[in-house]
Image (spheres, rainbow, N blue to C red):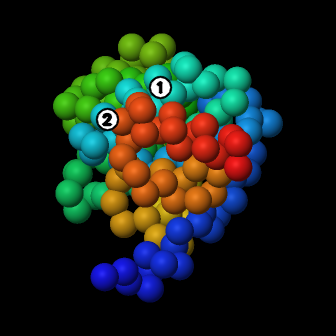
Amino acid sequence: MTTPLQVTSARLRLPVTETDHARGPADAAVTIVEYGDYQCRFCGAAYANLAEVLRQRGDSVRLVYRHFPIANVHPYAESAAEAAEAAGRRGRFWEMHDWLYQHQDQLDPVHLSLGVEQLGLSPDDVDTEVGGHAHADRVRRDFVGGIRSGVTGTPTLFVNDVRHEGGYDVAELLAAVDAAATA
């Protein structure tokens, strides 16, 4: 049985803007918006597959990442999202994003500080911002945008503003991208 929320939430409600974190050409034929949680193992699997999609369709796909930390299940997800934003403030969002997904089992504060340091950023500065929730509004904005678009779990993907209802293995994602590119 389909609930009204599922029926009305098939489209992205918060349009992509220049403030979003995006990889790939701005004029790409296909934009994938991912609502993700750095501590979610399913997002970790999708991360690797989306990287492969970008590798194979780099000229025609743009990936936008939005935060959707499910804090009641993943205790380090919000601080990881805020650390990514702190890195982003220094022009290093994607490097931190990659580190977080590649080290999902190391998102506690001690390991997170080590990761920040590995990226050449000041752990003290980033820890201060994360501890003071300097980027909580940005993370919350992404989360609320996800709720408005019907996101209830992670990862949730939208392909050209339409919710992707399929899986997130490479073959399914490539098929969705190719279909959207020719639509």
Sequence order check, earlier mark of 2 and 1: 2
**Residue that mark 1 sits on:** 51
Circle 2: element type: helix
Few, some or many residues within 10 Å of mark 1 (<14, 14–19, 20+): some
- Residue displayed at 19% across by 31% down: 105
Q: Do the residues under discs 2 and 1 have CB atoms within 8 angstroms?
A: no
User: For the residue marked with disc 1, what is the amino acid?
Assistant: Ala
Q: Position of residue 64 (x, y in %)?
A: 59, 42
Numbered mark located on residue 161 in the image:
none
Circle 1: element type: helix
Please state if 39 lies on the left or on the right of 69 as rendered. Answer: left
Res. 162 visible in picture? yes
**Residue that mark 2 sits on:** 44
In the image, is residue 130 above or below residue 140? above
Quadrant of the frame with the N terminus: bottom left
Res. 38 visible in picture? no
Q: Position of residue 116 (x, y in %)?
A: 40, 23
In the image, is residue 167 above or below residue 44? below
Q: Position of residue 21 (x, y in %)?
A: 61, 40
Image quadrant assignment for residue 111: top left
